[in-house]
């Protein structure tokens, strides 16, 4: 079980009709000692679960046929646990989450388009592109030529972005870092090794 999760297992309310479930709202919000609580019914939930997110948000998921009253009782029973977990989510954490979300939106807008432009320009072909919040790498290319790009690239200068994109596109031809790989990379980007050297000094963690 996640340290920030609590689960309540209770019997289903067999008296609740399907028709009444359709008419009822599947979400509800409440405030507990200044903490906003979001209750959400989920068709695949079997138990009532309390989750405290890293940014301090509290989500209570519950089965479709569970009552909001029962869920609220579970929350009240565990309010000290909730308050303790929320207190561990600092303003810095919430600020970082907001920054990441902004970068994610920008990355989805910029990176796939630029990757396609470079692929067309230099004659590369790739399968799919994914934008992720990766902790240790700027990008990667699978054996199926699916390219993963780190959303934090948008915090860098354009020359670093182009280097990473061309680096991964080159891997669609050469899967290793042997001489043939660098020959092709530097053919398309003559200053690639210089950019690579400077990029290694930039820590992804320092951008968050």
Image (cartoon, rainbow, N blue to C red):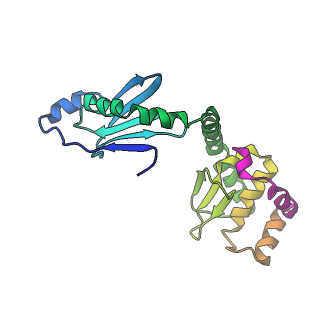
Residue at horizontal 74%, vertical 43%?
155
Residue at horizontal 46%, vertical 47%?
3
Q: Residue 38 location in percent, x, y?
A: 40, 30
Where residue 8 sits, quadrant-wise, is: top left
Q: Residue 119 location in percent, x, y?
A: 69, 59
Residue 188 sits above or below residue 180 on the image = above
- Horizontal side of 15 relative to 177 (left or right) equals left
- Looking at the image, the residue that sits furthest to the bottom is 179
> Can the viewer see residue 123?
no
Residue at horizontal 14%, vertical 34%?
17
Q: Residue 131 location in percent, x, y?
A: 60, 51
- Horizontal side of 8 relative to 129 (left or right) equals left
Q: Which residues are magenta?
A: 191-208
> Can the viewer see residue 188?
yes
Residue at horizontal 57%, vertical 58%?
128
Q: Residue 54 location in percent, x, y?
A: 54, 40
Of residues 25 and 29, the one drawn nearer to the viewer in this rendering: 29
- Horizontal side of 204 relative to 36 (left or right) equals right
User: Residue 154 lies in magenta, yes or no?
Assistant: no
């Amino acid at each position: 079980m996640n340290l920030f999760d609590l689960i309540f297992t209770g019997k289903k309310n067999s008296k609740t009709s399907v028709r009444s479930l359709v008419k009822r709202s599947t979400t509800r919000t409440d405030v507990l000692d200044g903490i906003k609580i979001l209750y959400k019914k989920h068709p695949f939930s079997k138990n009532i679960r309390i989750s405290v997110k890293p940014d301090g948000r509290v989500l209570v998921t519950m089965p479709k046929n569970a009552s909001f009253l029962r869920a609220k009782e579970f929350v009240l029973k565990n309010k000290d646990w909730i308050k303790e977990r929320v207190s561990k989510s600092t303003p810095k954490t919430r600020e970082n989450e907001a920054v990441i979300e902004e970068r994610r939106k920008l990355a989805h807008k910029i990176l796939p388009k630029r990757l396609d432009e470079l692929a067309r320009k230099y004659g590369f072909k790739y399968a799919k592109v994914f934008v992720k919040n990766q902790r240790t790498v700027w990008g990667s290319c699978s054996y199926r030529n699916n390219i993963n790009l780190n959303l934090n690239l948008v915090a860098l200068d354009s020359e670093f972005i182009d280097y990473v994109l061309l680096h991964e596109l080159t891997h669609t031809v050469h899967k290793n870092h042997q001489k043939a790989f660098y020959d092709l990379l530097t053919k398309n980007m003559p200053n690639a090794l210089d950019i690579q050297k400077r990029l290694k000094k930039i820590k992804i963690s320092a951008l968050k």
